[in-house]
Image: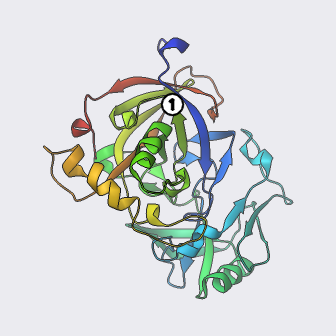
Amino acid sequence: MEQLPSESDAIAKVSSIFIYPIKSCRGISVSQASVTPTGFRWDRQWLVVNYKGRAYTQRVEPKLSLVQVELPDEAFIEGWEPSKSSYLVLKAPGMDALKVSLIAPREVSNGVSVWEWSGSALDEGADASKWFSDYLGKPSRLVRFNTASETRPVEPEYARGHNIMFSDMYPYMLLSQGSMDALNNVLKEPIPVNRFRPNILVEGCEPFSEDLWTEIRIDKLAFLGVKLCSRCKIPTINQETGIAGAEPNETLRKIRSDSVLRPTQKQKGKVYFGQNLIFKGSLTGKKGNVVKVGDLVYVLKKVSSADEAAA
């Protein structure tokens, strides 16, 4: 078994864990989460789609940022299974609360698509469809990833053989508080971390040090840093109002563009903030794949500059 570093070798610790059960809706801050190969349990398991089955995201429907999502507290305990009285509860301005059973539905919707992927998904039924249709003002359905019949691979050139559900590209996204603080120091108006929708927020390390991490250990679980996280329009959307502005992307283009970070690499016109991760496995071989707030973070392998990092 691989020798584990000592606590004094830790470079950071987990300060927050976020799960986003419905893609592009609000996240849930939790004290612990079960780790799976496709992401934290419950993360991006649901998707809102239009009448053609195409995904709605905040890019085109920023009102989704105002949809609050609740899960039972016990849903984050490893090994917990839902009963008939277990629900996903949704709330939004001007809407009555919607309860969606956590027991998987039987009805299947074909032709569901998100980005490059298309396949079938489990349809959450008429009540959920009416709720989202009324809220967004256009025909909508709520679907759940069908793990029994579907797989959605990540980009094979970066992490061949790994899969996700409805997340963007990778199972996990890690960000450091140091990077958030450094960005806020140069913004006219500081912004909260929810603009970037990370799964794992760590503290105690230098700003942007996560750019360099290619293999880390969180407690006794190993993750690979496989690609810098390129940012889209969503960080410009105020998650409390659903209104978009110019920042932080305008500032990120000045300090976090590929021309700044990766001058010797092929230019893609992107900005980067955070590190995409895949789960490698437990370093002890024991059961109990859970990440908890307060877990120590160790860097096992890294590159020397962002110019060398995959992006």
Please report the residue visible at 53 percent of the width from the left and 70 percent of the height from the top. Answer: 120
Please report the residue visible at 55 percent of the width from the left and 14 percent of the height from the top. Answer: 7
Q: Position of residue 140 (x, y in %)?
A: 60, 82
Of 258 and 253, nearer the camera is 253
Query: Given the current orientation, which residue lies at the most extreme bottom position?
Result: 138
- Quarter-of-image position of residue 286: top right
Q: Position of residue 27 (x, y in %)?
A: 62, 56
- Total count of labels: 1
Please report the residue visible at 15 percent of the width from the left and 45 percent of the height from the top. Answer: 263
Q: Residues within 10 Å of mark 1 (few under 14, many from 20)?
A: some
Q: Position of residue 152 (x, y in %)?
A: 45, 57
Mark 1 belongs to which amino acid? Gly
Question: In this image, 6 relative to 103: left or right?
Answer: left
Q: Is residue 132 above or below residue 35?
A: below
Q: Position of residue 76 (x, y in %)?
A: 72, 44
Question: In this image, 260 relative to 89: left or right?
Answer: left
Q: Is residue 31 above or below residue 282?
A: below
Question: In this image, 86 relative to 108: left or right?
Answer: right
Question: In this image, 259 relative to 283: left or right?
Answer: left
Please report the residue visible at 51 percent of the width from the left and 57 percent of the height from the top. Answer: 195
| Residue at disc 1, secondary structure | strand
Disc 1: which residue: 281
